[in-house]
Image (cartoon, rainbow, N blue to C red):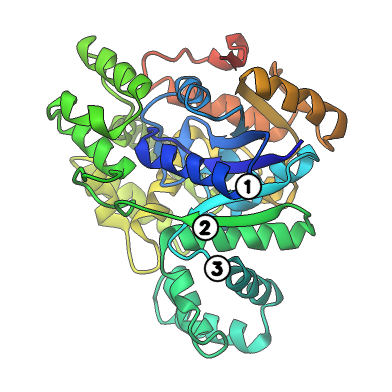
Amino acid sequence: MNITGIVVEYNPMHNGHLHHLELCRDATGPDGIVAVMSGNFVQRGAPALLDKWTRTKHALENGVDLVLELPVLYSLSSAEFFASGALGILESLGNVSSLCFGSEYTEVDKMLEISGFLLREPQEYRDSLKKHLDSGVDFPTARSLSLEGSLKGLTGYLEASNSILGIEYCKSLLRLKSTIKPVAVQRSGSIYADTELSREFSSATSIREHLRNRRNMDELRPQVPENVFLTLKQLEQQCHSFAESSAMLPYLRYRCLTDRLALKYLPDVAEGLENRICTAAESAGSFDQLIDSVKTKRYTYTRICRIMTQFFIGFDKFDTAAMRKQAPQYARVLGFTKKGAEILREAKRSSSIPIVTKVRENEFKALDLELQATRAYSLVNPDIRHNEDFFRSPVIV
């Protein structure tokens, strides 16, 4: 079978995602599409607006054939680890032919050139990177500045968000010596940070902002697939609130008051940041105020959001530094279609790691962390039980 892999969050799924799926089909002509999707927490450092089961159903009803979960160990990480986890899962299946991703730049040969350079990390580049980081700039800026002398004309690839992620995908494929072919398709519509709805492919950020501000729900109908709109409309009519970072604040305050030192054990915390965070948590009137009080040039808004969400979940109870050094230990199935069932049967014969449809505790460290994440997610999304993972079977469409 000719299987195309994609990496998604669908937070929530919108028309830009449908367009991406169409472009992927045109570019790779697949027999089926496998998506590795972030679970209940997403890469920007926040709980997903809708739970992973609902988002899986939306994906399957709109063209994806098989949805696998990207463990929270990776989904709440930098672009490098996010990509490493997703591509590790796709590679392990043994039946994925291509990876298709949207990007501001679509020349894959240049992406592979940049990726190869970053994997080699010549001494001159490492010295320049350290110099720029020591000056106080964030890592993406330091990396872009350090590459200017070595990769002339290509640094723009490391300044556009989707292109950055695409390069991390290519790096992971090179590191794995994978036969999966990377395919970049042109990204269209609003940039991910846009907060206002657009006539063409509104960003997920703008849709979340629209919901957060309780604007006219019917204005979202042209922006998202019909099944997504109906889900959002139903939740609004039932007066259900959507999962938001703001709901984590009381729990974060409690953890700061009772377990401040635990912050030191998070993978991205250094330089006494735990004291700065807990001081801010005591007085912040909102989650956004907390992040604004802590962020610096080195610790960006998104990075602090990830740290706070990791703290909320309890990453400090796990040796996440060691876990990140390992390849993904399992592939968990969230849902599939009839075509997806065929892909799954083939993958079970070729996969180098176990394919999980029913979870058990103490089977894999990363899965135990996932169960902990669902418990935490139940605190910000009342529709989800703390032990939901044990009761849910894969979604079948």
Q: Going 44% across and 15% down the picture, which residue do you hit?
A: 384
- Where is residue 364 shown, x and y percent of the image? 74, 30
Q: Going 21% across and 40% down the picture, which residue do you hit?
A: 286
Q: Is residue 384 left or right of residue 37?
A: left
Mark closest to the chain's N terminus, 2 or 1: 1
> Which of labels 2 and 3 is toward the front?
3
Amino acid type of the residue that numbered disc 1 sits on in the rendered structure: Thr
Which residue is denoted by mark 1 in the rendering?
28
- Furthest residue toward left: 216
- Where is residue 307 shown, x and y percent of the image? 44, 48
> Tag 3's secondary structure?
loop
Label annotation for residue 165: 2
For the residues labelled 1 and 3, the Cα–Cα distance comes to: 16 Å
Q: How many numbered callouts?
A: 3
User: Does residue 71 appear anywhere in the picture?
Assistant: no
Who is closer to the viewer here, 92 or 122?
Answer: 92
- Where is residue 37 shown, x and y percent of the image? 55, 35
Which residue is denoted by mark 3 in the rendering?
107
Label annotation for residue 119: none
> Local crowd at mark 1 within 10 Å, few (<14), some, or many (≥20)?
some
- Where is residue 90 shown, x and y percent of the image? 70, 42
